[in-house]
Image (tube, helix red, strand yellow):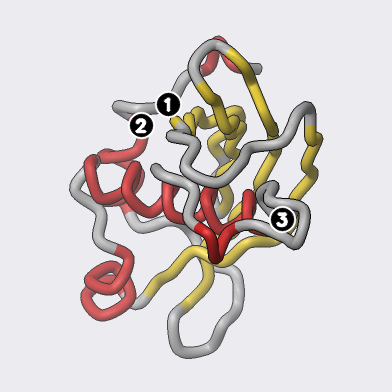
Amino acid sequence: MRVYYEDTDAGGIVYYANYLKFFERARTEWLRSAGIGQQSMAEQQHAMFVVKSTSMDYHTPARLDDELEITVVIEKFGRASLVFIQQAWRGEQCLASGRIKVGCVDAVLIRPCAIPAAVVSAVQARYSPSAN
């Protein structure tokens, strides 16, 4: 993804909270590439993912017009949650890293529920236990 003016602060560097937006977009596209559309998951399986917690480390700033690669790896696969490790890279340099836990909830009641079987099957093919 490209860093746009709207992503930067007055100093011309990416505002720290925007890395969470970058990571959210990357997780969404990662799920989509596994055949999981979050809107269809909510409509058809009555379940959706919500962020439960985040932990971020910032190593060096990204700047306007930088091209970033955002990585997505599952650290832990639970019955009703996933823990992702994500990083923002500019070339060979890691700019930020984070641990994001998402929980699966019933789309109507907004209460925890098991990840639907079809989603489990699609995500397990991408699960990387070596990240533990």
The residue carrying pointer 1 sits among few (fewer than 14), some (14 to 19) or many (20 or more) residues within 10 Å by Cα, namely some
Query: Horizontal placement of 123 versus 82: left or right?
Result: left
Numbered tag placed on residue 15 in the rendering: 3
In the image, 103 versus 23, the foreground residue is 23
Callout 1 secondary element:
loop
Upstream in the sequence, badge 3 or badge 1? 3
State the CA–CA distance, disc 3 to disc 2. Answer: 33 Å
Residue behind mark 1: 127
In the image, 35 versus 115, the foreground residue is 35
Among all residues in the image, which is located at the extreme bottom? 108
Numbered tag placed on residue 117 in the rendering: none
In the image, residue 93 lies at what x, y percent? 61, 16
Q: Looking at numbered disc 2 in the image, what kind of residue is underneath it?
A: Gln
Q: Which residue shows up at 45% across the image and 89% down it?
A: 108
The residue carrying pointer 2 sits among few (fewer than 14), some (14 to 19) or many (20 or more) residues within 10 Å by Cα, namely few
Q: Looking at numbered disc 3 in the image, what kind of residue is underneath it?
A: Tyr
